[in-house]
Image (spheres, grey):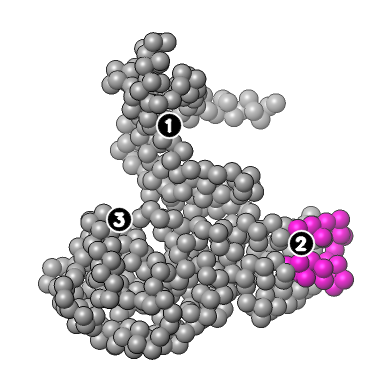
Amino acid sequence: MFENLNEKLERSFKLLKGQGKITEINIAETLKEVRRALLDADVNFKIAKTFTENVKTIALGQDVLNAVKPGQMMVKIVHDELAKLMGGTFVDINLKGSPTVILIAGLQGSGKTTFSGKLAKMLKSKKGRHPMLVAGDVYRPAAIEQLKILGEQVGVPVYTEEGNMNPVKIAQSAIREAKMKGYDVVIVDTAGRLAIDQQMMNEISAVKDAINPHEILFVVDAMTGQDAVNTAKEFNDRLNFDGVVLTKLDGDTRGGAALSIRSVVEKPIKFVGTGEKLEALDNFHPERMADRILGMGDIVSLVEKAQEQFDSEEARRLQKKLAKNQFNFDDFLKQIQQIKKMGNLKDLASMIPGMGKVMKNIDIDDDAFKHIEAIIKSMTPLERENPSVLNGSRRKRVADGSGTNIQEVNRLIKQFDETSKMMRMVSQGKNLNRMMGNMRTR
């Protein structure tokens, strides 16, 4: 995501390297490259032109401090303008109403049904809500089955009416059912088409008028670039939706939709889908996205993801075990499983400043931990609890049982020992402070 744009913007900033100050002459070539980078990312031409004109106006009006180089100043200006282009500030979903009614719209194949399941999971696990999903796509039986499966996976009921081909009546009945059974959010999945047509627009408008939703979210595939922006405009003209959801942002997308859509429809991007897993849904923060586009990482989002998986009771238990030097392979396995829940590993790594470029040509499989898990699960309960008993013959048996080799088993045991030592030091404040003190005196 945004890798090509990041590279080209970096090249444009290098044109100012060695310059003493920003002038109209030396900024011209830089801005030409910035505009080219945006166009290559499939950003609308008028938006790219306006963007670079705004950057130029701000840059020429800046008094560059001696401590700040022109290139650094340009990065800061472009960062702020990118954030502004994408909306400036985070806008949350509207959850007013009893129940809150959320209408999901978009073309077929944009990821509406999957997003509905992800949103239900997010509202249930992070907001403590009790959502109900509504199967309003009456034309595609697979969509109803898919929603049922998603509902089962996230533990959320799915309202369906077999044989009823009237999405308006289905949505109205679902809201009545939600009120009776105490569900506080109703998420209505609707039908889409492969392209915009009058019948679809009339139908979804009728659903909107009948149920008067508190929130209308337009779901669009980010990989479709400018087509996504054009489709969003047509839907907004008809529905006046409240926010945009960009799906498949983890794919080979150039980023043009994310950068253009806010300017065209003047509605905030509220969510981004970053993978196929049901946890792979993030709130959209323009400033954080600008950070990532410019290769600055996104530590705040990384910490938030870690906190979502943080179990304070488990942390206390682990700290006691570390203090007594009782950390074992069962604990190690639990830590791996928590990391996996945080999301796509390559995406997580790219949130660390400077790591995006390093990770560019490295493929990290989501199953990167599978060999480690296989090795640990091939150990006996005694071996997992007391790693010190793993002698040569036991290691050979574990290697055979996990489909790996003795070298991989030895390497894991060595990594486990090093991790145990590091975690023990972190858990003992005195040792950590002493270590940091030694580093400062070197």
Give the side of residue 164 with respect to residue 318, left or right: left
Q: Quadrant of residue 424?
A: top left
Say what secondary structure mark 3 lies in. helix
Instruction: Specify the quadrant that holds the N terminus.
Output: bottom right
Quadrant assignment, res 137: bottom left
Do the residues bearing badges 2 and 3 touch, measured as CB atoms within 8 Å? no
Q: Give the labeled residue for mark 1.
A: 371
Residue corresponding to mark 3: 125
Three-letter amino acid code of the residue under disc 2: Ser
Closer to the chain start, of discs 2 and 1, is 2
Horizontal side of 46 relative to 145 (left or right) equals right
Q: Residue at x 65, y 61 (%)?
A: 5
> Magenta part mainly helix, strand or loop?
helix
User: For the point 62% across and 56% down, which residue is it?
Assistant: 3
Span shown in magenta: 11-34
- In which quadrant will I find the C terminus? top right
In this rendering, the label closer to the viewer, 2 or 1: 1
Asked if residue 190 is positioned above or below residue 431 in the image, the reply reads below
Amino acid under disc 1: His
| Eye-nearest disc, 1 or 3 | 1
